[in-house]
Amino acid sequence: MATTGLAGDLAALDRFGKDEDGGFNRLAWSVELRRALEWLAETMAEAGLRTELDPAGNLIGRWEAGSGAPLIIGSHLDTVESGGRFDGALGVLAGVDVVRRLRAADFVPARPIWIVAFMDEEGERFGTAMVGSQAIAGELTELPAELEDSDGVTLGAAMAGWGRSPDRLGEARLAQPPWGYLELHIEAGPVLEEGGSDVGAVTVVAGIAAFEVTIEGRASHAGSTPFGARRDALLAASRLVVELRERAVRGNYLATVGRLAVEPGGISVIAARATLTVDFRADAAPRLDAAAADLGDALAGIGELTGTEYRCRPIYRLEPLPMDAELIAAIEAAAAEVGVRCLRMASGAAHDAMVIGRQAPAGMIFVPSVDGISHSPAERTRAEQVEIGAQVLAATVRRLCA
Ligand code: HGY
Ligand code: MN
Ligand code: MN
């Protein structure tokens, strides 16, 4: 039975980028993402929205009603490698469905309502992040065309396939800031499910600081090189992973090494080089600063101990951002109106709301993630929880646009 509305749209999106493990691969500027956005543009148009793909690859659907600056309801359709079905997609599709629901109820908003699928929120392919939302906010005007993905495809070439150019991102800047911003998103963690709440009203979006670390050792023979004569890059990297965890626990921030490459990778060869990424998260800037300082201190100590050299390159940093108090209250009132339990909570994951929220009041609504899993094929939110999220989003929009 072809389901309609939000559930039907989520099912329709399964056609774009799903792999054999059930994960989704709609990377920034990929063909899969473009096909998904072409489908979304049609779906938006059917809902009565006027659509535009802007210079930064953001798909914007406008409900030109009322007057003044718009309320933007946004999220993203791009995913991480083999990502989940709901991360980003839920917020975009729920936004379109809220427009349908409000039109069906003959609701006429006092201000324009735009639904936006931001380009490259995840930043996995080119080591960028929040590209579309930063471009719309006027915080990003261009990117190096020579950035390469893991297949050696440059950003310039990938964008050219979309008729877009990395040196013209600035043209996406909005002429005026939006009136406000709302994003419905999966929690991507265990708090709502464990606490038994139906929705979350986000109080702060944690900041993110990512680095690429290269550790240079010296290749040598595994059988004839005494330990005292080794410069083992993988030993150094291994110590770093453990020490970062210990420092993060002490410093009350999160540290994750998600990517590690070792060269030359021979069974009987001491590792000459290790390249790894470090992802720090904290909901206050001073703790992000402390994390970066801890990384430098750890590398210096480990370099001394193992006789290795190191380089540390910042990949990106996004500042933590508190959500707007009035929007938090509107979300809580909407949840009460719908008759569901709402929990005030921080977001450990980064979101476009932390960018748009620097231009205008922003609020986020969370729905539970089963087993707290996200960025994985196992990412799941139950159908009734999806529906509750859409109802709370619609009720919040009615309050903000009455
Ligand atoms: O990594 C994040 O927090 C987000 O999903 N991009
Ligand atoms: Mn994500
Ligand atoms: Mn997301």
Image: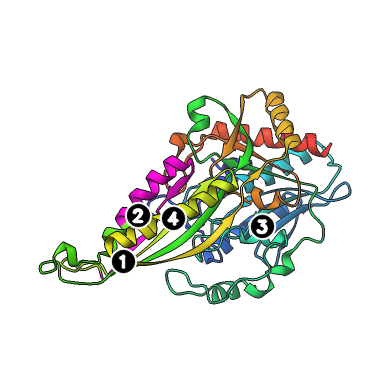
Label 4 secondary element: helix
- Secondary structure state at the residue bearing disc 1: loop
Decide which of 307, 3 is in the foreground and name it.
Answer: 307
Q: CA distance from mark 3 to mark 4?
A: 29 Å
Looking at the rendering, the stretch of residues picked out in magenta corresponds to 238-264
Looking at the rendered structure, the secondary structure element under dot 3 is helix
Report which residue position mark 3 lands on: 133
Name the disc covering residue 308, or none. 1
- Separation (CA) of disc 2 from disc 1: 12 Å
**Can you name the residue that lies furthest to the left here?**
224
Q: In the shown orientation, is residue 309 left or right of residue 337? A: left
Which numbered disc flags the more N-terminal residue, 1 or 3? Answer: 3
Query: Which callout, 3 or 4, points to the residue nearer the camera?
Result: 4
Kind of residue at badge 4: Leu
Q: Is residue 240 magenta?
A: yes
In this rendering, the label closer to the viewer, 2 or 1: 1
Q: Which residue is denoted by mark 4 in the rendering?
A: 295
**Residue at (47%, 42%) from the top-left corner?**
251
Separation of residues labelled 4 and 1 (CA atoms): 15 Å
Circle nearer the N terminus (2, 4): 2
Specify the label residue 240 is tagged with: 2
Specify the amino acid type for callout 1.
Thr
| Label 2 residue near ligand 1, CB within 8 Å | no
Q: Disc 2 to disc 3, how far (Cα)? A: 33 Å
Q: Mark 4: few, some, or many residues within 10 Å (few <14, many ≥20)? A: many
Q: Residues within 10 Å of mark 2 (few under 14, many from 20)?
A: many
